[in-house]
């Protein structure tokens, strides 16, 4: 071999190393976990749009540039090999990938800024029970529920500043909204009409406010009213479907929400669960046929008494039966959201259930435990500490809240009130009915009218009333956010699978409390990633298992 000068060797090595670390314009390849954290922080900053005339920029040109730049972030992530990292850090790597895929999906397919007028709702009067808002929302929201009334001078100024962003945003929206989905357009118009009512209520609430806030509210109302008028004028031309189709649905399910299922799998699972819920209800009714019927709370005083007693009983039961570690902050977190008495004629599905037996609804308020844990026991990983974007958390958040409804039934909570068990099965049937309807809507087999009718038909006892707002709200949300309507039931299904697997792994060492503690400690991340962290089994293997598990149940509507 001929002699090669040492300086040339060094130069060749340097060139080779530089080639290895150059990734899509990034001069340094990230190789450590801290590099992943830094990349994610940079991505979150990148994800937020710049401002255009005082409002977030959702113009087509800006979003085309964002899609191009997103590829650089995804390439940088792909260049990080986490194979040698601890499993918890591998999970974080996968979670970052899911969030990046969420932005990719929004930019390529969902495009709420172009298809969905409800995307431009700014004023939010209440806190979501989930980690973040359900469904797509813009980046300049006015979270009215975070303010303390009467407003201080500083808060009046802050609120006025936020409200001044509404007129330029809605002016921009008229050019951005080019979609042809009729159901999204019509329901989104209703959402924006509600913003007018909410602004009117705010104006009344702050009638003594200074001139800056008063003017800002009036300007926001005027802009919203004009926007609704514009939406109404455009409505006759909107004649297209609003669902994204099975292929896009499957991509989002697997790559954004990390749910190892397909549209067909979810149809099969929800059909099976709908049948199980109806059959179980009939068995409960037979078993309880000689018992007196449940009676609903008939006054505000009776409702508050029942709700308060239910929370006390529930927290004591969780502790006595060794279900959860009952930290002192959990009970106040639940009591804050027990609701109030609603007259029968205005009582929606969940109101009917809670007026008969509060805990049939309150068990789903595991959501508020999650909020409390996020505050009091934040995750060590900064990647998991915040609510992930694009509702990536839905299988965990809604799946666990739904699972808790049936979990406490089987664990004996209603042994002293057997009739309440019937309501648990009605709750599950309703969640299956609305989830199936949302699947057919995303596949464009149903329009929203048919989806609502299906949900009403398959909810037992006529409890899903078509004349109340809840029905329209639910099907609109699930049309706006593909996969959300099914996450309650399929998330629960994945949790059942995880319980089965952990019980098999641990044998006699398995306990419900230990399972829930390790499950909760993983944070609000997709159930498939919790499975990866708890069992050590890779998600690709899990995907294969699920395909086999539901393969024989597939059915088409």
Image (cartoon, rainbow, N blue to C red):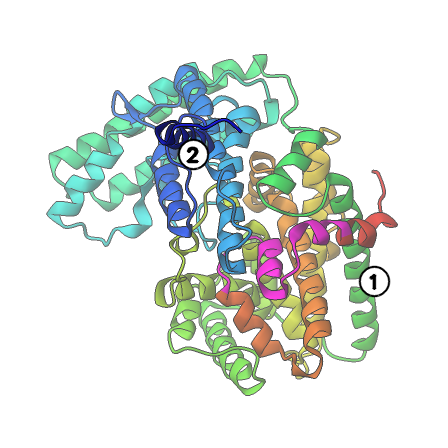
Task: Give the magenta-colored segment's residue range.
Answer: 522-544
Q: From the viewer's side, name the closer residue of 104 and 197.
A: 104
Residue 279, which numbered label? 1
- Residue at point 48% right, 63% down? 341
Q: From the viewer's side, name the closer residue of 533 and 23.
A: 23
Using the image, determine if residue 313 lies above or below residue 255.
below
Instruction: Pinpoint residue 237: horizontal percent, then vertical percent.
Output: 58, 12
Q: Secondary structure at mark 1?
A: helix
Query: Can residue 242 be found in the magenta stretch?
Result: no
Instruction: Pinpoint residue 287: horizontal percent, then vertical percent.
Output: 82, 76
Instruction: Pinpoint residue 134: horizontal percent, then vertical percent.
Output: 49, 44
Residue carrying label 2 = 17
Q: Residues within 10 Å of mark 2 (few under 14, many from 20)?
A: few
- Residue 16 seen anywhere in this rendered image of the structure: yes
Query: Can residue 527 be found in the magenta stretch?
Result: yes
Residue 549, which numbered label? none
């Amino acid at each position: 071999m001929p002699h090669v000068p040492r300086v040339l060797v060094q130069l060749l090595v340097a060139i080779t190393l530089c080639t290895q670390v150059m990734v899509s314009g990034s001069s340094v390849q990230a190789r450590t976990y801290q590099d992943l954290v830094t990349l994610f922080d940079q991505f979150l900053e990148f994800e937020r749009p710049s401002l255009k005339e005082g409002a977030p920029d959702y113009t087509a040109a800006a979003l085309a540039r964002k899609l191009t730049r997103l590829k650089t972030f995804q390439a940088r992530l792909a260049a990080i090999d986490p194979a040698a990292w601890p499993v918890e850090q591998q999970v974080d790597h996968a979670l970052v990938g899911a969030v990046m895929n969420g932005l990719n999906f929004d930019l390529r397919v969902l495009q709420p800024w172009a298809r969905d007028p409800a995307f431009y709702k700014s004023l939010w009067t209440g806190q979501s029970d989930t980690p973040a808002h359900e469904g797509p929302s813009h980046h300049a929201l006015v979270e009215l529920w975070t303010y303390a009334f009467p407003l201080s001078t500083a808060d009046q100024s802050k609120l006025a500043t936020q409200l001044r962003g509404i007129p330029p945003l809605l002016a921009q929206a008229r050019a951005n909204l080019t979609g042809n989905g009729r159901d999204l357009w019509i329901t989104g118009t209703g959402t924006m009409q509600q913003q007018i009512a909410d602004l009117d209520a705010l104006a009344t609430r702050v009638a003594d406010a200074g001139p800056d806030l008063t003017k800002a509210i009036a300007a926001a109302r005027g802009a919203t009213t004009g926007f609704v008028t514009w939406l109404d004028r455009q409505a006759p031309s909107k004649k297209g479907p609003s669902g994204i189709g099975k292929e896009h649905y499957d991509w989002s399910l697997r790559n954004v929400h990390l749910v190892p299922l397909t549209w067909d799998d979810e149809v099969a699972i929800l059909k099976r669960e709908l049948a199980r819920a109806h059959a179980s209800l009939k068995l409960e009714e037979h078993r309880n046929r000689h018992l007196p019927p449940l009676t609903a709370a008939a006054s505000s005083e009776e409702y508050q008494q029942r709700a308060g007693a239910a929370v006390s009983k529930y927290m004591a039961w969780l502790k006595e039966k060794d279900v959860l570690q009952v930290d002192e902050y959990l009970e106040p977190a639940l009591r804050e959201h027990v609701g109030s008495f609603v007259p029968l004629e205005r009582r929606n599905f969940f109101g009917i259930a809670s007026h008969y037996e509060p805990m049939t609804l309150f068990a789903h308020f595991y959501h508020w435990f999650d909020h409390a844990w996020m505050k009091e026991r934040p995750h060590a990983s900064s990647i998991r500490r915040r609510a992930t974007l694009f509702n990536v958390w839905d299988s965990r958040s809604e799946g666990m809240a739904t699972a808790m409804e049936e979990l406490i039934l089987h664990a004996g909570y209603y042994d002293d009130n057997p009739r309440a068990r019937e309501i648990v099965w009605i709750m599950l049937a309703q969640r299956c009915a609305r989830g199936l309807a949302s699947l057919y809507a995303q596949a464009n087999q149903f329009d929203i009218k048919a989806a609502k009718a299906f949900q009403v038909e398959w909810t037992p006892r006529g409890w899903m009333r078509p004349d109340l707002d809840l029905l329209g709200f639910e099907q609109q949300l699930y049309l706006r956010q593909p996969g959300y309507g099914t996450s309650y039931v399929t998330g629960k299904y994945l949790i059942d699978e995880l319980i089965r697997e952990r019980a098999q792994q641990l044998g006699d060492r398995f306990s419900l409390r230990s399972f829930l503690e390790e499950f909760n400690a993983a944070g609000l991340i997709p159930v498939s990633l919790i499975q990866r962290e708890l069992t050590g089994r890779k998600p690709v293997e899990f995907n294969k298992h699920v395909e086999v598990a539901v393969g024989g149940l597939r059915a088409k509507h």
